[in-house]
Image: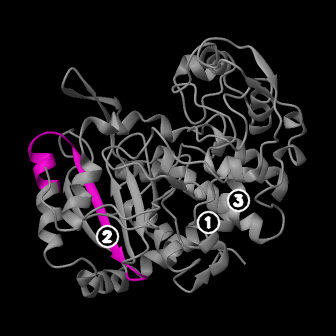
Amino acid sequence: MLLGRPLLAALLLAAGTTDAAAEALDAKAVQAPAAPAVQSLLDGYVQSGKLAGVVVAIGRGDRLPTFFSAGRISDERGAPPAGRDSLWRIYSMTKPITAMAAMKLVEDGKLRLDDPIATYIPAFRKMRVLTTPDSSLDSRPATQLITVRHLLTHSGGLTYQFLGKGPIRQEYARLGLLGGRAGAQATKVQPATLAEFANRLATLPLVSEPGTKWNYSVGADLLGRVIEVASGVPFQHFVSTRLLQPIGMISTYWTVPRSQAARLATNYAWVANKRVAIDAAPTSEWFSPPKVHYGGSGLVSSARDYDRFLRMLAGSGQVGGVRVLKPATVRLALSNLLPTGVRVVGSGTPSLPVAEGYGAGGWVYLADVPNGVRAGTYGWFGAAGTIAFIDRATGTRVTVMTNYFPADKWPLAIDVTNALYGRHSR
């Protein structure tokens, strides 16, 4: 039986002193030379004005993480220090969570990786493919069907409105196919349900033949609709009850409760070399429910919570004595699931080398990065500077939480990696 969130929160809170003691004992999870380097790096980012606040969680294997932090959750006077339980908008780091929810259905036999999604959404039975995607909407019939595998790996021929080129970009915007939260004007044209989102998306041609190219896309948003059809329950309910709640992710929300307002960080954007608040914590849009719960972005989480998700993956589907996925399912999810001959191109984690492979909702490095992450490392990042990955060769897991746009304004990801692996950060 699943515990209600208030009861679960109370139980985890009661265990807080035990966790704190264990975290102190597990400080060795971070190599001694790396710990001061990571802390010095974060202090420097805050002292130089690049970030208002930042938190990093680093763990090994199934051990509890060591937390590093600097600064505050906003520039406002009296704002709390950034910490392990501060709340941050994780944007596309929602994708791995959605992907593992889908893998749960694969494990349950309700989905198969190579099932055509038309099995669940009939509107996708007959798709068309653009012949000159950068310049026109001319199209031909698709010869392949989009599959669950394609949605998990961004190889289904879909795109994002902000990445699209030519007329297809305008078509995504016209139909409100943005995914995640959007501004007031965009919200007016956004679909009201995942079903409507999927059916609108099916009316547009694809930018490439399914299974032939990697294009970063709304695939995870569409996967949310597949999940709710296959499971028979609303997407967000399935994710919460079958994944988040069982492993104790009690601080991961699509809508932040007002009772947790003091933990929410302010989101910033760099405009003309000045950091400007674009979603101030006291009036954040995340206190209101989204129009649609999308699988590609939109969650808010804490460093402690997201590390718990990574611990579950590092623990082969189990954390805290609770198993949500079988070891074989996790091995499959963290492997390279791209169709034969397809590689990731053109959209790596900000400042990190592009990983050529892609698993369920995140990149997979197919080769070692010199003096850096090893082959098999899995992870993904968020548009506002967050990043999370598991180096499976060493058992190291890393979560970085901060909020600023654009994420590639600063080389935070590579700097944290450099500090962790003992190289000089920039």
Check if mark 3's residue and mark 1's residue have beta carbons within 8 Å.
no
| Residue matched to label 1 | 333
Q: Is residue 265 visible?
A: yes
**Identity of the residue drawn at 60% across and 74% down:** 331
Q: Is residue 80 visible?
A: no
Q: Considering only vertical position in the picture, is 83 above or below 158?
A: below
- Gap in Å between the C-alphas at discs 2 and 3? 26 Å
Q: Considering only vertical position in the picture, is 388 above or below 275?
A: below
| Residue matched to label 3 | 102
Q: Residues within 10 Å of mark 3 (few under 14, many from 20)?
A: many
**Along the horizontal axis of the image, is 202 left or right of 207?**
right
- Give the residues drawn in magenta, as a range: 42-63
**Identity of the residue drawn at 59% across and 42% down:** 214
**Secondary structure category for the residue under label 1:** helix
- Gap in Å between the C-alphas at discs 3 and 1? 10 Å
**Secondary structure category for the residue under label 2:** strand
Q: Amino acid type of disc 2?
A: Ile
Which mark is nearer the camera, 3 or 1?
1
Closer to the camera, 372 or 20? 372
Mark 1 or mark 3, which is nearer the start of the sequence? 3
Q: Quadrant of residue 157?
A: top right
Q: Amino acid type of disc 3?
A: Ala
**Identity of the residue drawn at 79% across and 56% down:** 114
Q: Amino acid type of disc 1?
A: Ala
| Residue matched to label 2 | 58
